[in-house]
Amino acid sequence: MFIEIDFNSEEAIYVQLRNQIIVAIATSQLKEGESLPSVRNMADDIGVNMHTVNKAYSSLRQDGFVKVDRRRGAVVAVDIDKMHTINKMRCMMKPLIASGIVKGVSREEAKKLIDDIYDGMEL
Amino acid sequence: MFIEIDFNSEEAIYVQLRNQIIVAIATSQLKEGESLPSVRNMADDIGVNMHTVNKAYSSLRQDGFVKVDRRRGAVVAVDIDKMHTINKMRCMMKPLIASGIVKGVSREEAKKLIDDIYDGMEL
DNA sequence: TAACTGTTATATTAATGATATAACAGTTAG
DNA sequence: CTAACTGTTATATCATTAATATAACAGTTA
């Protein structure tokens, strides 16, 4: 698996794992219907505890990125709730944009940033 | 002061306070050179401990939003470090955009969101 | 049956958020 | 000069969370 955990990061391990899996889905490295490694295998791979992986998987299930099949484990299965997602994005982005404005980042520069991130993922 | 703390939020109080002050600077409710309420006054106003406010102020100083003057307390004084700010924004936005992509949020919708947030602040 | 899935239950350790009380060193108005 | 105010620092306590560990349970499957 294509996971890299930074153990010196201030960001919780399960959050890092969660985010990297979401990015993997966004970039089609993980496709709809594919299974994630079992919590035990993933834990061994990246050198963390089983429960830390389980926490990440549960969070992904909670937010509609995977579903759990007794037979195949955690399977990529996206619930489309665009409205809710956009509201969440707005909430998270507001303080980011605010600090950008204060620090002199223009609207165009912010949009350029969006383009950069989309370009890095959609192709 | 125009601060509203949500005590039921999962977000730390000092982070809420910090973010709301940044938004206040972005919207010119707080202008360069203005003093923030003293840590004790602010703490009384919003009903939290002095140290919680101090933590927010220290964080704002650390990130170049205010400077501390022995005479006037915490004063709005912005260090422009656009490069650093954009890198931070990129870092924080990447997983947000990724979940947006997975949930079907288009590039245009993301930019529309940026416009909405800018419109809500710059005027 | 044996090996595998996610899940649950406990327990412990370390770190963090928030609180509280207290003091210190500058600053400033009366 | 005194009194009241600044941010800051030092402790201490309590609750929550992140991460670990060991163990077991209920389905699934070769």
Image: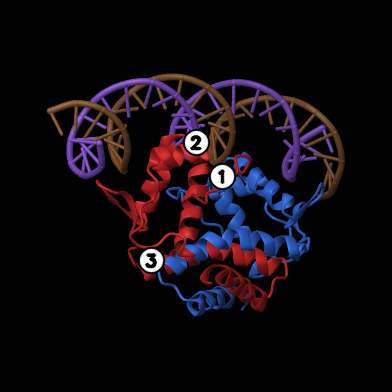
Chain colours: A blue, B red, C purple, D brown
Which of the 4 image quadrants contains residue B106? Answer: bottom right
Task: Classify residue B43 as left or right of residue A123.
Answer: left
Residue D5 spot, x, y in % from top left: 32, 38
Please determine whether, in this image, residue A4 is positioned above or below residue C19.
Answer: below
**Which residue is depicted at the point 67% across and 53% down?**
A37
Are the residues under badges 1 and 2 in a single subunit? Answer: yes
**Which residue is depicted at the point 63% across and 40% down?**
B8
User: Which chain does tag 3 point to?
Assistant: B
User: Which chain does tag 1 point to?
Assistant: B
Q: Amino acid at mark 2?
A: Val
- The crowding category of the residue bearing disc 2, from other C-alpha atoms within 10 Å (few below 14, some 14 to 19, many at least 20), is some
Q: Amino acid at mark 3?
A: His
The answer to whether residue A112 is seen in the rendering is yes
In the rendered structure, find residue B48 and report the number of the disc placed on it: 2
Which of the 4 image quadrants contains residue B113? Answer: bottom right
Residue B53 spot, x, y in % from top left: 43, 41
Labels 1, 3: front one: 1
Residue B71 spot, x, y in % from top left: 25, 47
Q: Earlier in the sequence, mark 1 or mark 3?
A: 1
Are the residues under badges 2 and 3 in a single subunit? Answer: yes
**Secondary structure of the residue carrying numbered label 1:** loop
Q: How many marks?
A: 3
Q: Amino acid at mark 1?
A: Ile
In the rendered structure, find residue B84 and report the number of the disc placed on it: 3
Residue B118 spot, x, y in % from top left: 55, 71
Residue holding disc 1: B5
